[in-house]
Structures are given as C-alpha cells and as structure tokens.
C-alpha cells in the first residue's frame, strides 16, 4: 500500500524551530516530486513547499520563503521540512503529499499538527 | 502568484441534486486544474486532475470542465458520502495555489 506518514509536530514557542518528517512506503519514492501543504484550524489548504524527485529543485510559498527548508533522503525514503522563526500564524496541520498525474497531489499523509504558542 | 477563487464558499443541497462548483484563476492556467475532496479530520483526496480526468476509483458522478481561467466541478447526483469540502488547485506554476474551498452541506 502506498503510504505517507508525517511526524515531528507538536507545541513550540513563538520564535522557535521545528523539523517535520514524512516517511514514504509502498512506492518508488525516488521517482516522485513531493509537496508540503498546511491547513490552519478551520481554514483552507495552503501550499508550503515542493521538491523534485532528486532534491535538486525546491520551491517555497512566497510568505514562508527564508524561514523554511525542504529536503529529502531517497535512500531512507523520507521528506523533511525545517521551519524556523515560528509564529502563531504557522499553527496548522501539515500534510506531505506525492505529486502524481497532471502534477496533482495523489497520495497524502494523515498530517502532523504544529501549534505555536507560549 | 496565481490566485484561485472558488464560488460559492458554501452551499446546501439535497441527496440527488446536481451540484456545480466554480473555480476561477487570476491568469490562464491551460488545463492544469485539480479538484480535491476533504472530509472533517481527514486528509484531502484527489478527485480530478488536468481539469477533467477522474482519479482512479472516483465515481463517475463527478466531472470537471473548463479551460484557461474558468473551471467547474459537477456532481451529477449528490450522494450522502459527498457532503464535504471541495478545493481546486492550479498546477500550472509554482507556488501551486489552492482555492478557498466550497463546503457542501445537507439541506
């Protein structure tokens, strides 16, 4: 079964940092670009970041550029998101997703919750 | 960034109704338009990609259309399991922006 499982979320103080991870199983991870998408409580989906299949091309949401870094380890089939200078506005469920046909996101993880609060 | 605008933001409908949701892009995106369904507490699920191609396993009552800047998602006969929030997303350029969502509720 093709599956993505996120981890690393939790409660962090304003100004703090956090590293999220996404473990992929059941498919050839190194063949696919991957995305991070977030969703604040009660709100819509927001693109966060993307990385191509070999990790050489990365993109970030305009509002987050400079505070986040995406990376991947194809040997371990994991995707990471390093976030810094966190504020309450970063409080959200963070999903990793696989880019599939039509450049759409065809496989999603269950999400990991990040709460920024003192 | 390309802005994606969905309408309506919410709607009430009955089982069996035909429902259409609209998504408009702030600039042309060719046919790079995708639709997702999300139920409370769950991850989004891909329904349609490239404007009109049904993802494997998605019922045929779902259909998509449009091109350029204006797109639609139609549910031909609403079923109880279709009550959810629907999002469009453009995959034409980075950042791959989402619409604000349309919540489909039971009338």
Image: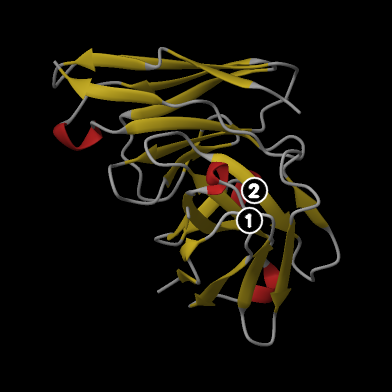
Whether labels 2 and 1 belong to a single chain: the reply is: yes
**Mark 2 and mark 1: span between their CA atoms?**
8 Å
Looking at the image, is B103 positioned above or below residue A92? above
Left or right: A96 in relation to B90 = left
Q: Tell me if I can see residue A54 in this picture.
A: yes
Which chain hosts label 1?
Answer: A
Mark 2–mark 1 CB contact (< 8 Å): yes
Q: Residue at x 24, y 33 (%)?
A: B82
Image coordinates of residue B72 in percent, x first then y, are 49, 18
| Mark 1 crowd level (few <14, some 14–19, many ≥20, 10 Å Cα) | many
Left or right: A80 in relation to B12 = right
* Residue pointed to by mark 1: A35
Which quadrant holds residue A14?
Answer: bottom right
Foreground pick, A115 / A74: A115
Which chain hosts label 2?
Answer: A
Q: Residue at x 44, y 27 (%)?
A: B101
Image coordinates of residue B51 in percent, x first then y, are 57, 29
Q: Secondary structure at mark 2?
A: strand
Q: How many marks?
A: 2
* Residue pointed to by mark 2: A48
Image coordinates of residue B90 in percent, x first then y, are 64, 32
Q: Secondary structure at mark 1?
A: strand
Which quadrant holds residue B50?
Answer: top right
Q: Quadrant of the N terminus of chain B?
A: top right
Image coordinates of residue A54 in percent, x first then y, are 79, 71
Left or right: A17 in relation to B43 = right
- Mark sitting earlier along the chain (2/1): 1
Q: Residue at x 53, y 45 (%)?
A: A88
Q: Quadrant of the C terminus of chain B?
A: top left
């Amino acid at each position: 079964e093709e599956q993505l499982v996120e981890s690393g979320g939790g409660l962090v103080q304003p100004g703090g940092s956090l590293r999220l991870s996404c473990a992929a199983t059941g498919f050839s991870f190194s063949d696919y670009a991957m995305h991070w998408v977030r969703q604040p409580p009660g709100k819509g989906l927001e693109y966060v970041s993307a990385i191509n299949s070999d990790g050489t091309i990365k993109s970030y949401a305009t509002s987050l550029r400079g505070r986040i870094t995406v990376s991947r380890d194809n040997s371990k089939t994991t995707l990471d998101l390093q976030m810094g200078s966190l504020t309450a506005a970063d409080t959200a469920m963070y999903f990793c997703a696989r880019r599939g046909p039509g450049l759409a996101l065809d496989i999603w993880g269950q999400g990991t919750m990040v709460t920024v609060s003192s | 960034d390309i802005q994606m605008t969905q309408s309506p933001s919410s709607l009430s409908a009955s089982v069996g109704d035909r429902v259409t949701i609209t998504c408009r892009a702030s600039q042309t995106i060719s046919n790079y338009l995708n639709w997702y369904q999300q139920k409370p507490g769950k991850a989004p699920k891909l329904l349609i990609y490239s404007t009109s191609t049904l993802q494997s396993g998605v019922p045929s009552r779902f259909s998509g259309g449009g091109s350029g800047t204006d797109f639609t998602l139609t549910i031909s006969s609403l079923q109880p399991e279709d009550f959810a929030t629907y999002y469009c997303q453009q995959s034409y350029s980075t950042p791959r922006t989402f619409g604000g969502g349309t919540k489909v509720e039971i009338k």
